[in-house]
Structures are given as structure tokens and as C-alpha cells.
Amino acid sequence: MLTLALILILAAVAYFLVTTLVDLYPFNNVRDAKRSEQIVEVSVNAPIMALPAVLLGLAAVIPLPALGYLAGALELLIALGGLVLWWMPYLLGVTAPWATKGTGVSWTELHARTYAHTLIVLPPIAGRPRPNVEHMLLHALILSAAIFTFIAAASL
């Protein structure tokens, strides 16, 4: 389980990096994102997303299961953050206050410019920003990593 958890965490980080930096239109729409937005997103999120792998690896080497559980909790927090960022505006019409911090635009404006023309399968709700397939897959990968990280921690 440890190997699977580490693979899932690192796969989520790699997936995030590729979909943030590489134009895979219509799956993503990197071409309409500002380079400064991409750099901020990667520099803030990638280290945070990679930290559970470091913690879980240390938990296995030391061995200290508490670090594994901390890794799982952090991975779960990352998953919840993604769900709040994408699903709260869609389902509730409320945007997280940190959604576009430092970009100078609202979540609705950023979504309209960078995500609205990507692959989206969810039905519209009152003109609210909808999660696209790219992020639905990322959230599923991160949530799976969180689950398997907790399982791995329990087996240490």
C-alpha cells in the first residue's frame, strides 16, 4: 500500500504540473492562462502537493506512523481545498475567498477566460463556473491518494 500511495501522490503532482503548464486543449486551456498565473499556481501548489509524499516516505523509513497519518490528513486537506475551489461555486454559487488571490480577477472572470471553453460534462447551474473534466480527474486522483495514504499509514 505504501508504494501505491506514493505513486498516487506523485502522479497527482505530475498531472497537476502537466495540466497547468502544457496546452492540452480542449482538455485544458493553458493557452489562455497568463504565464504569471501559471507560475503562481505551480510555485504555491506543487510543493504543498508533494509534501505528503515526503512525509509518508519519512514515516516508512523512520518508522513513525504518525507522519503517515499527517501525510494523509494533508492530502485530504488538499482534496478538500480543490473541492471547495471548484464545487462550492458550482453547487452553492459561493466562491472561496482565496480562489484567485494575487491574480487581480474574480473566480468567475478567471474561469470564463481559462476554463469555460474546456471539456465540461456537468450541466450549467444559473451561469455559475462549472468544474471541468481536467479538475474532476485531478480531484479524484488526490482523493484516492488520500485514502491510500491513510491505508499505508495504518500498515506501518
Image (cartoon, rainbow, N blue to C red):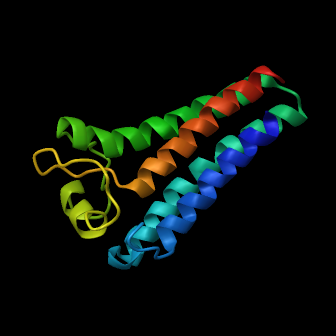
Q: Is residue 74 left or right of residue 115?
A: right
Q: Position of residue 50 (x, y in %)?
A: 65, 50
Towards the viewer: 108 or 46:
108
Q: Is residue 83 left or right of residue 152?
A: left
Q: Is residue 68 above or below residue 105?
A: above
Task: Tell me which residue sits at (50%, 72%) in the image.
Answer: 21
Q: Which quadrant of the figure has residue 5?
A: top right
Q: Which of the image's four quarters has the C terminus?
A: top right
Q: Position of residue 70 (x, y in %)?
A: 66, 29
Task: Tell me which residue sits at (82%, 25%) in the image.
Answer: 64
Q: Is residue 127 above or below residue 19?
A: above
Q: Which quadrant of the figure has residue 47?
A: bottom right
Residue 132 is at least partly visible in this image: yes
Q: Which of the image's four quarters has the N terminus?
A: top right
Q: Position of residue 118 (x, y in %)?
A: 33, 66
- Extreme residue toward the left, this view: 126
Residue 54 is at least partly visible in this image: no
Q: Is residue 45 above or below residue 81?
A: below
Task: Tell me which residue sits at (56%, 45%) in the image.
Answer: 141
Q: Is residue 47 left or right of residue 1?
A: left
